Image (cartoon, coloured by chain):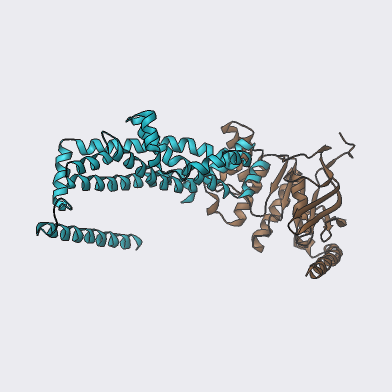
Chain colours: A cyan, B brown
Amino acid sequence: MKDHQTGKSLIIGIASLLVFLTIWELVCRKGLIEPLFLPAPSKVLSRAVKMIDNGQLIAHTLASTRRVMVGFMVSSLVAIPFGIFLGSFGFFRAVFDPFISLLRPLPSMSWIPLSLLWLGITETQKYAIVFMGSFAPSLLYIIEATKNIDPLLIRAARNLGASRVDVMREVILPGSLPQIIAGLKVMLGIAWTCIISAELVAARQGLGFMIMNGKEYFQTDTVLLGMVMISITVLIIDVIFRRFERRLLPWTQ
Amino acid sequence: MDPVENGTKISIRKVSKIFSGKQGEVTALRELSLDVNEGEFVVIVGASGCGKTTLLNLVAGFDAPTRGRILLDGEPVTGITPECGMIFQHYALFPWKTVQANVEFGLKMKRMPRSERRNRAAKFIDMVGLNGFETTYPHHLSGGMKQRVSIARSLANNPKVMLLDEPFAALDAMTRQVLQEQLVRIYEKHRKTILFITHSIDEALLLSSRIVVMTARPGRIAQEIVNDLPYPRNADVQLSNRFMEIKRTIWESVQAEVMKSMEVETDQR
C-alpha cells in the first residue's frame, strides 16, 4: 500500500519535471528568452554529451567529489573523537569553548584568502577549506549529541565496571551516533558549499571551476550543466550515505 | 579496616544525606543505620519520597553521604563499584547492544576473552529464560523481558551485592509475579546478598528474609521485621495467618509514615 503510494508520487514527480522542461524548451525555441541568459534544456544536454565525450564532465565532477570527501572525512574523523571527549568532560569543554565560538560564525569563504596565501592553489588548500568550513559546526553538533545521552545509561555502565574511557567508547559514542550522523548529513551539504565557493574563486578543475569558466566564455549551457551536476552528485551521495547509516545503526530499524 | 561483625556485608552507619537546591536544603536521610548480613535478602519499604533511592545510590557509590559512612565488607565505599550490581526500575539496557552484548557488557569491561564471555553470558540468558533472544535489540522486548536481561547482565558480572531499585514497579501484575518468583529462585540458588527497594508490602513479604520500614522524609528506619515465612512463598503461604499478621504490622507502621508525609506536604503549602 505504502509502496504503491510512493510509486504514484514518483510518477507524478517525473511528469511534473517533464512538463516543466517541455515548457522551458518551447519558450527557448520560440526565441522568447535570449540564449545567453537561459539556454534550452536540449542545449544543456548536448553540452553534457560533448563534455562526457571529451572526459571533462567526469573529471570535474570527480575532482569536486574527491575534495569534498577528503575534507569532510578528515573533519569528521577529528571532530567525532574530539567532540565525544569535549562532551564527556566539562572542564575541557570550557577550555575550548571560546575558540569554537569564535570559529563557528566564520563562513568558509572567509578562509579562502588566508588558505591561498598559506597553501597556494593546491588540492591541500581545497581540503583545508572544506575542513575549516565543516569542523567547528560538526564539533558543536557532536557535543550537543552527547548531551542527550540518558545519564542512567552512564551510571549503569559505570556500575558494571566501565572506566570513564570505556563509557566514552561504549556508551557516549554509540548513544549519540544517530544524532551525529544526522548532523554529519547536514555538514556534508555545507562541505559542498565550501568546495564550490573555493573552486569559484581559484581552481583549475572541479564543478565550481567549470561553472566559472563557462561564465567567462559566455557558455551559459556549461554553467547550467555544472549546477545540475552538483545537484545530481549531492543526491547520489545522500543515497549512499543513507545506506551507510542503516548499516551503522542496526538497532534503530 | 573497621571492626565489622562477622558476616556483615553492608554496614550503613549514621548516614545523613542533605541535598541543597534552589529552595534551600532538603534532608533526604538522617542518621540512618542498617547492617545487611551476607546472604540476606533485605527489602526496604517506604512511601514515595522517603529517600529509599537516595540510600541505594549511596550504597552503589553513585553519590556520597553528607555525613556518616557506608562499608562494604568492612571497606568504606568511596566511588562507583561493580561489586554492587544495580538493577534500575527502567532497566537501563543499552539500546544499541543486543541482548547478548548487554549481558556481556560487564565481562567485556573486565577484558574477559570473547569466547569465555559468550559462554558465561549464554548461561545467564538461559537462567532468565531468554534463549532465542540473544540477537534481539532491547526495543523489541517487553518490559518484563528487558528487566530479565538487566538481571542477567548484573548476575553475569558476579557482584557481591545486588541492589534493586523498585525493579518491578513498571510491570503489569502478571509479569511482576513471574519475575518475583524467578528472583526468589535465583536468590535461593546463588544466595547473593540483596538489598531491594519497593513501596509494595506484598512484594516485600514475598521476597525478603528481612523487611525494613523507612520513615517519611528525612528517611530513617521505623521498623525492622524478620520475615520467617517459609520459601517458596506460594499461594498457601500468602493465605496463612502469619503472612496476614506480618502484613498488618508493616501496614500500620507504613500507614503512620504516609500520614506524616502527607501532613508535611500540607504544611508546606
Q: Is residue A70 above or below residue A219?
A: above
Residue furthest left as drawn:
A30
The x, y position of residue B16, in whole percent, is 83, 50
- Picture residue at 37% right of the left edge, 46% below the top: A189
Foreground residue among B22 and B227: B22
Q: Quadrant of residue A69?
A: top left
The x, y position of residue B23, in whole percent, is 75, 59
- Picture residue at 52% right of the left edge, 41% below the top: A100
- Residue B40 in view (yes/no): yes
Q: Is residue B138 above or below residue A10?
A: above
The x, y position of residue A175, in whole percent, is 54, 46
Foreground residue among A194 and B35: A194
Give the number of callouts: 0
| B172 relative to A57 in the view: left or right | right
Q: Quadrant of residue A62?
A: top left
Quarter in which the N terminus of chain A is drawn: bottom left
| B221 relative to A252 in the view: left or right | right
Foreground residue among A37 and A42: A37
The x, y position of residue A76, in whole percent, is 45, 38
- Residue B193 in view (yes/no): no
| A20 relative to B4 in the view: left or right | left
